[in-house]
């Protein structure tokens, strides 16, 4: 079967680009308005500082030891994600996420629970 490079890139899951550390390509997919649900992915120990995270569903993601410094995650879904030993300096979190929840997840790896 013959495929073109355009078809190949259309078939590629933009969410898999994060796991391959292809941040610029991931951001390009997002800028093109393509949906991306990262839910349940293992993103531990990744440097996500340059990722366009606006509106991304990180529910049930493993973000342990990830570098989230300076990210604006206010529009992200973080229900069930874990943050054990993540770097979070200057990071905005969703309004429904208590500081105690963040601290528990950072220290003990508990899953984040959003206020309802």
Image (spheres, rainbow, N blue to C red):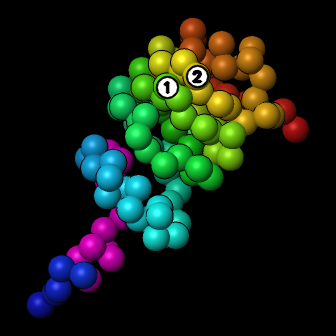
Q: Distance from label 1 to label 2 (Cα)? A: 6 Å
Against 86, is 113 above or below?
below
Q: Position of residue 85 (x, y in %)?
A: 47, 14
Secondary structure under tag 1 reads loop
Q: Nearer the viewer, residue 50 or 102?
A: 50
Q: Is residue 7 visible?
A: yes
> Given the current orientation, which residue lies at the most extreme right position?
116
Q: Is residue 62 left or right of residue 22?
A: right
Mark 2 or mark 1, which is nearer the start of the sequence? 1
Callout 1–callout 2 Cβ contact below 8 Å: yes
Q: Quadrant of the N terminus?
A: bottom left
- Please report the residue visible at 42 percent of the width from the left and 20 percent of the height from the top: 65
Q: Position of residue 20 (x, y in %)?
A: 26, 47
Q: Nearer the viewer, residue 86 or 1?
A: 86
Q: Where does label 2 land, which residue?
A: 90
When asked about the image quadrant of residue 8, the answer is bottom left
Q: Position of residue 103 (x, y in %)?
A: 65, 13
Q: How many marks?
A: 2
Check if residue 17 falls in the magenta segment: yes
> Would you call the spot at circle 2 few (<14 residues within 10 Å), some (14-19), or many (20 or more)?
few
Q: Where does label 1 land, which residue?
A: 69
Secondary structure under tag 2 reads loop
> Would you call the spot at circle 1 few (<14 residues within 10 Å), some (14-19), or many (20 or more)?
some
Look at the image and give the residue range highlighted in magenta: 7-19
């Amino acid at each position: 079967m013959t495929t073109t490079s355009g078809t190949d890139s259309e078939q590629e899951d933009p969410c898999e680009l994060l796991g391959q550390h292809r941040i610029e390509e991931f951001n390009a997919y997002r800028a093109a308005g393509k949906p991306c649900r990262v839910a349940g992915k293992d993103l531990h120990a990744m440097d996500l500082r340059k990722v366009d995270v606006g509106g991304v569903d990180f529910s049930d993601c493993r973000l342990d030891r990830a570098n989230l410094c300076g990210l604006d995650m206010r529009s992200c879904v973080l229900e069930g994600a874990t943050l054990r030993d993540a770097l979070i300096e200057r990071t905005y979190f969703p309004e429904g996420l208590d500081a105690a929840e963040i601290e528990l997840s950072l220290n003990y790896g508990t899953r984040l629970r959003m206020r309802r």
